[in-house]
């Protein structure tokens, strides 16, 4: 009977999912992430939502009934089809890389998630922190990589290598990764209320 009770308790344990988004502003990517966290079955999942900066998205999350907090992080890799490489973004990426990776590790140790969901491609230092803690990583990619083929190959290769699974928000973004079964397209939801 004891082993049956232990099995039942294990099945009832909710899966803790740590959602992380860079920034604190309101936009399509953070709102979509909040909708995803809000839609999880509360009997099976416990969403833990963090942003890397304070801002209006925290109030928006509260209105949605999603608890959210801030974990400051200063390093992201901002490069894409509409975001060129610039010294003003590259310098903070390099300067704060280690501290951001470490902050991610400390956050994981404090929250003890079963799974981490990174929102957008910019969170490379955070992804490294997740992998160092050995937590499964789902990386939600919502943008197309930039045109420089060397940087593009490195960026997409790093995402693929660090993620246990990659989610893209469109087939257009998915084609960046070829026909890899590790990549799934899940379109953004539409709130019809």
Image (cartoon, rainbow, N blue to C red):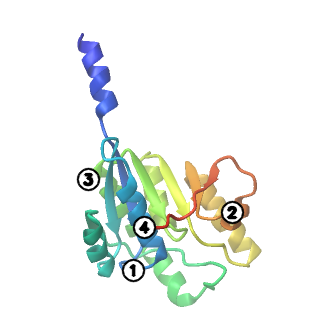
Q: Which residue is mark 3?
A: 110
Mark 4 and mark 2 in contact (Cβ < 8 Å)?
no
Q: Nearer the viewer, mark 2 or mark 4?
A: 2
Residue 8 - label: none
Question: Of callouts 3 and 2, which one flags the residue occurring earlier in the amino acid sequence?
Answer: 3
* Identity of the residue drawn at 30% across and 42% down: 43
Spatial distance from mark 4 to mark 3, Cα to Cα? 18 Å
Residue 171 - label: 2
Q: Nearer the viewer, mark 1 or mark 3?
A: 1
Assign a secondary structure to mark 1.
loop
Label 4: how many residues lie within 10 Å, few (<14), some (14-19) or many (20+)?
some
Question: Of callouts 4 and 1, which one flags the residue occurring earlier in the amino acid sequence?
Answer: 1
Spatial distance from mark 4 to mark 1, Cα to Cα? 27 Å
Spatial distance from mark 2 to mark 1, Cα to Cα? 24 Å
| Residue 31 locus on image (x, y percent) | 42, 71
Q: Quadrant of residue 151?
A: bottom right
Mark 1 and mark 4 in contact (Cβ < 8 Å)?
no
Label 3: how many residues lie within 10 Å, few (<14), some (14-19) or many (20+)?
few
Question: Of callouts 2 and 1, which one flags the residue occurring earlier in the amino acid sequence?
Answer: 1
Q: Nearer the viewer, mark 4 or mark 3?
A: 3
| Residue 39 locus on image (x, y percent) | 39, 55
Assign a secondary structure to mark 3.
helix
* Identity of the residue drawn at 58% across and 88% down: 86
Residue 26 - label: 1
Q: Which residue is mark 4?
A: 98
């Amino acid at each position: 009977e004891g082993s049956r009770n232990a099995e039942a308790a294990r099945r009832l344990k909710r899966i803790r999912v740590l959602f992380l988004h860079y920034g604190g502003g309101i936009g399509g990517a953070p709102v979509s992430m909040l909708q995803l966290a809000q839609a999880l079955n509360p009997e099976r999942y416990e969403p833990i939502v963090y942003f890397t900066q304070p801002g209006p998205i925290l109030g928006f999350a509260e209105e949605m009934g999603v608890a959210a907090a801030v974990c400051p992080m200063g390093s992201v890799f901002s490069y894409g089809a509409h975001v060129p490489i610039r010294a003003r973004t590259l310098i903070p990426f390099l300067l704060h890389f280690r501290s951001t990776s470490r902050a991610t590790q400390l956050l994981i140790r404090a929250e003890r998630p079963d799974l981490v969901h990174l929102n957008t491609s910019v969170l490379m230092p955070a992804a490294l922190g997740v992998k160092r803690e050995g937590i499964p990583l789902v990386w939600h990619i919502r943008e197309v990589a930039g045109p420089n083929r060397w940087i593009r190959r490195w960026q997409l290769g790093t995402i693929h290598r660090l993620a246990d699974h990659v989610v893209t928000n469109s087939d257009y973004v998915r084609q960046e990764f070829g026909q890899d079964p590790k990549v799934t397209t899940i379109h953004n939801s539409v709130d019809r209320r």
